[in-house]
Image (cartoon, rainbow, N blue to C red):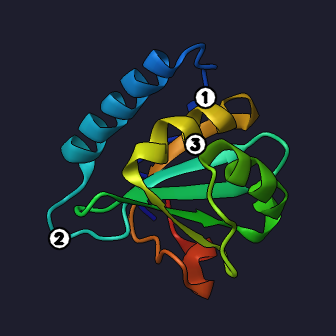
Amino acid sequence: MDAPRFKPVPWTELATPADVELWIDAHNRSLQEHIRPNESGYGVCFMLAPGGCLYLHTTQDGAILLDVDEEADWVTPLIAAATGATPPKGRLWVLPDDKLVQLVFGLNTLVDATILVVGHDFGSKLARHSRPY
């Protein structure tokens, strides 16, 4: 089996919204550098210290897709409070791009590590099988 392409990066707490914007910029550059043109389902997985994962993808048209795995259902009220959004009926949140800084800042103290992912099927039952490679 091949070694994973991506490795978890321990989280460093972000003190200000400007720190969050720098983090977002760094991850955008990392995605551009490491994601191959034919790959889909790419984004960032937030591994939460209390348990569970959130998979985040931003679309070309300015939406944020946030797939919350079952183990991370407990974070739903925090996502709603941080973004002002109504929780979806399923696992997939669709948020406007202007909520990204608030979302990351709101999750900030709960994140244990992040990892780039590809092949994540946002919103499907198979999402939990995405591979960080």
How far apart are the alpha carbons under marks 3 and 2?
28 Å
Label located before the other in sequence (1 or 3): 1
Q: Which residue is mark 2?
A: 38
In the rendered structure, the answer to whether residue 26 lies left or right of residue 35 reads: right
Mark number displayed over residue 10: 1
How far apart are the alpha carbons under marks 2 and 1?
28 Å
Mark number displayed over residue 109: none
| Marks 3 and 2 in Cβ contact (< 8 Å) | no
**Amino acid, disc 2:** Asn
In the rendered structure, the answer to whether residue 132 lies left or right of residue 24 reads: right
**Residue 133 visible in the displayed image:** no
Q: Which residue is mark 3?
A: 103
Neighbour tally class for label 2: few under 14, some 14-19, many 20 plus, Cα within 10 Å: few
Residue that protrudes farthest toward the bottom in the picture: 125
Residue that protrudes farthest toward the top in the picture: 15
Q: What residue sits 31% from the left and 30% below the top? A: 25
Residue 81 locus on image (x, y percent) = 72, 46
Residue 26 is drawn in which quadrant? top left
How far apart are the alpha carbons under marks 1 and 3?
18 Å
In the rendered structure, the answer to whether residue 60 lies left or right of residue 91 reads: left
Residue that protrudes farthest toward the left in the picture: 37
Q: Secondary structure at mark 3?
A: helix
Residue 124 locus on image (x, y percent) = 55, 84
Q: What residue sits 60% from the left and 48% below the top? A: 83
**Amino acid, disc 3:** Leu
Q: What residue sits 66% from the left and 36% below the top? A: 106
Name above or below for residue 86 compared with residue 43: below
Neighbour tally class for label 3: few under 14, some 14-19, many 20 plus, Cα within 10 Å: many
Neighbour tally class for label 1: few under 14, some 14-19, many 20 plus, Cα within 10 Å: few
Residue 49 locus on image (x, y percent) = 79, 39
